[in-house]
Amino acid sequence: MINLDNINKVLMCDECNSEFEIKYPEDNSKQNYLKCTSCDIQYKIVDGVIIFEKKSNKIKNNYQSKIYSYWWSDSHKNIVYDNEASKKILKSTINLETKDFQNKIVLDAGCGNGRFSDFIVNGSPKLYVLADLSEGIFQAYKKIINKNFDIVAAKGDLNDIPFKPEVFDIVYSWGGNTSHKKPKKNI
Ligand SMILES: [Zn+2]
């Protein structure tokens, strides 16, 4: 379930530095959306995932998004990941174990379809933020949505998602395919 407190913990309007609110249109055919409490900035919410798009990047991102959306949803559709292998990759590439995520605010930057999310969730982070440009994020989110867990899911280029500065304890990216804004790393 999308939770405004969690959203405001890690995101803020990058036009005016204000908090967000969630709007629930009375007309059921319209989608919920995230809106800045002070200015007119708003973002769509689709299946619990906040969609961040900047018009200036739209063309470039659509192209990249299509490629990676294909990668995750079609080309990877039938792949069943070997959990032990995933665990080893995580350990050997970023040298983190499940327990390292405990009580941390974690950004999974370029989460894809959530290959590593189980391990991170099992480590009981305080708040787990999924971010990815591709449609894979909807799968990643669905995988862990029922785990009674504090999650924020943001679809977009990492440069377009208005994260608060220095809010994450761990920024994790494995094979992330988007360009990075150099978020603070405490790994
Ligand atoms: Zn604003």
Image (cartoon, helix red, strand yellow):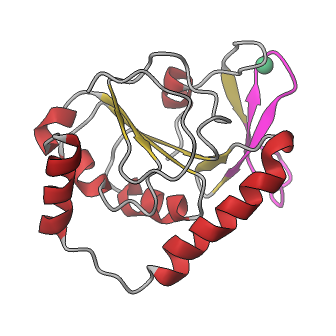
- Magenta: main secondary structure equals loop
What x and y, as percent, mark residue 186?
30, 21
137 relative to 160 in the view: left or right: left
Q: Residue furthest bottom?
A: 78
Query: Image point 38% across, 44% down: which residue?
Result: 173
Q: Is residue 33 inside the magenta stretch?
A: yes
**Quarter occupied by the C terminus:** top left
Up/down of 185 relative to 94, above or below: above
Q: Quadrant of residue 169?
A: top left
Image location of residue 147, percent across then percent down: 31, 53
Q: Seen in the image, is 7 located left or right of residue 147?
A: right
Query: Is 186 placed above or below 31 here?
Result: above
Give how far across and how far down residue 90 sits, in percent: 21, 51
- Tell me if 81 is positioned left or right of 128 in this view: left
Say which of 9 and 61 sits in front.
61
The span shown in magenta is 23-45
